[in-house]
Amino acid sequence: MQMTEADLKVRIKENKCGFFVFYGDNEYLKDYYASILRKGVAGDDFNYSRFEGDSFSFYDIEGFLGTYSFMNERKMLDVSDPKILKWSEKEQEAFKNLISDSFDDVTVLFVYRKDEFESKLIPPSKAPAKPTISYELAVSMSKNCFFVDFPASDTAKLTNWIKRHFEKENIPISDDAAHHLIDFCGNDMYILKGEIDKLCAVCESVSPVEIEKYCCSNIEYQTFDLSEALSQGNAKKVKEIFLNLKLKKADPLVIMGTLTKNFYDTLLAKEAKKSGVSSAMLSKDFSMNSWVAEKRMRSATSVTIQYLEKAIHECSECDKKLKSFSADQYAHIELLLEKLLLK
């Protein structure tokens, strides 16, 4: 069943367990509410299990639910991007039957990252002529699981959220300045939280002047997303981001420099992942923001070292052209993007 953020808050306040499915564009809120759910079994390795993606199978949840909680009244199963529709029909059938039971002392959490959610988990309003096991599973989940969609927050909600953070630190900020922070840095709450922390550390009050002096512009963050879209082969998103950068007259050299660094960081994450290094260690050892390290680790799983090395080489060649020719520099970048989409 669909659950709103407000309903989720009520259920958490009432300290009730359940089977939750988090999805949508707002990574910050998904992680925020997931962290609250985890606090119920914090520090309790016996009653908490975590899995990611393809490594999670039906037998993991069957085994977890088949055991009693130890020295705690509840336990929790925490899964990122589970691929349950890739399971065999036998496993999907068993999972469908399993989730029909109540979850009075167990919390199961599926967290789907942006673009990872399996849309077929939400059944269509009209049943197909020949229902498949995947459809029947989706129907069962719609009845027994709480689906919480976290869309990108609108400006009004973000403004209030920004002001609350500054008020907590007794730092004044006007609505206009809060709006400027959103315009300048974008509406990603992880990014905004990092910029808010930065401003709180150096400012006694916040105005557009301080924002532009201390914060990273949305152009840099859009270039970050551009590298993600390229490595995923998402031509539509690449075109959308690039056209927006042109519209804002972003400096081609800034685009190029940021794009190159992003590919270097992903290559670094790829090597780290291969060596068994966690995102937390990557963040600490290379002074990388934790959310950047996590995103890079996720990106590293879907792209090859060969592609990253090619991307870095092509970026270097394009950078030379930008510094050598004064003609339409955006044309050079556009050609580069076309090359990098041909993985």
Image (cartoon, helix red, strand yellow):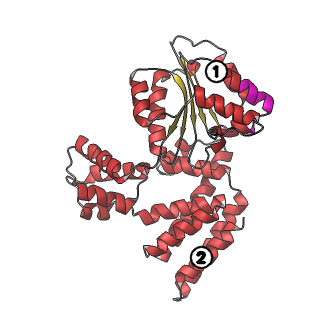
Q: Nearer the viewer, residue 95 or 205?
A: 95
First of labels 2, 1 by sequence position: 1
**Number of numbered callouts drawn:** 2
Q: Main secondary structure of the magenta part?
A: helix
Q: Residue at (69%, 26%) from the top-left corner?
A: 96
Check disc 1 and report the residue beneath it.
Answer: 100
Q: Nearer the viewer, mark 2 or mark 1?
A: 1
Q: Nearer the viewer, residue 102 or 2?
A: 2
* Image quadrant in which the C terminus is located: bottom right
Check disc 2 and report the residue beneath it.
Answer: 334
Task: Examine the rendered structure and indicate whether residue 165 appears above or below residue 238.
Answer: above
Q: Position of residue 228 (x, y in %)?
A: 58, 58
Q: Residue at (47%, 28%) from the top-left corner?
A: 37
Q: Secondary structure at mark 2?
A: helix
| Cα–Cα span, label 2 and label 1 | 51 Å
Asked if the residue at tag 1 contacts the one at tag 2, i.e. Cβ–Cβ closer than 8 Å, the answer is no
Q: Position of residue 297 (x, y in %)?
A: 60, 48
Q: Residue at (63%, 65%) from the top-left corner?
A: 235
What type is the residue that disc 2 sits on?
Glu
Q: Which residues are magenta?
A: 86-95
* Residue 90 image-quadrant placement: top right
What type is the residue that disc 1 sits on?
Ser
Q: Residue at (55%, 86%) from the top-left corner?
A: 324
Task: Examine the rendered structure and indicate whether residue 277 appears above or below residue 96.
Answer: below
Q: Position of residue 57 (x, y in %)?
A: 72, 31
Task: Examine the rendered structure and indicate whether residue 168 appears above or below residue 172.
Answer: above
Q: Secondary structure at mark 1?
A: loop
Q: Is residue 8 visible to the viewer in this orientation of the structure?
A: yes
* Image quadrant in which the N terminus is located: top right
